Amino acid sequence: MVSSLVPPKIASPNAIGGAADAARMQRVVGFYEKLPRGPAPKPKARGVLEWYSLRYMTGKNASAMPIVHAIGFFMVIGYAQNYYFHLRHHKNNAH
């Protein structure tokens, strides 16, 4: 009756000894000793997209400027398409 109340790992005789727990604890301590200490190093940009992301989208520099840049980019592309497909034909001739 009592054996159904106690979980099997606690009730087993192998779990009572100190050697297994000490080895397990040593692995945990070893893991935490290998972790780096101190503040994380600042990320360095290795390309144009990473530079743009670090400059405008991450950290304390995060802002809405990428939205403004996207709107300006699409305006320039839109005008270039209008010029190529329509406006260049009216450069010297009236409609």
Image: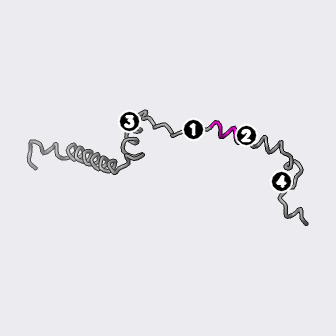
Q: Which residues are magenta?
A: 29-34
**Depth check, front residue: 54 or 12:** 12
Q: Inspect the image, locate mark 2, and give the three-letter code of the amino acid beneath it.
A: Arg
Q: How many marks?
A: 4
* Residue bearing the label numbered 3: 48
User: Is disc 2 in contact with disc 3, using a CB cutoff of under 8 Å?
Assistant: no
Left or right: 66 in relation to 3:
left
Location of residue 30 (image quadrant) = top right
Q: CA distance from mark 4 to mark 2?
A: 19 Å
Q: Is residue 47 above or below residue 64?
A: above
Query: Which secondary structure type mostly characterizes the magenta part of the structure?
Result: helix
- Is residue 40 toward the left or the right of residue 7 in the image? left
Residue lying at the far bottom of the rendered structure = 1
Q: Is residue 81 above or below residue 48?
A: below
Kindly identify which numbered label has been placed on residue 27.
Answer: 2
The disc, 2 or 3, on the residue closer to the chain's N-terminal end is 2
Q: Which mark is residue 37?
A: 1
* Image coords of residue 17 (percent x, y): 86, 46
Nearer mark to the viewer, of 4 and 2:
2
Asked whether, in this view, residue 2 is left or right of residue 59, the answer is right
Of 86 and 23, the residue lying toward us: 23
Provide the secondary structure element on which disc 1 rests: loop
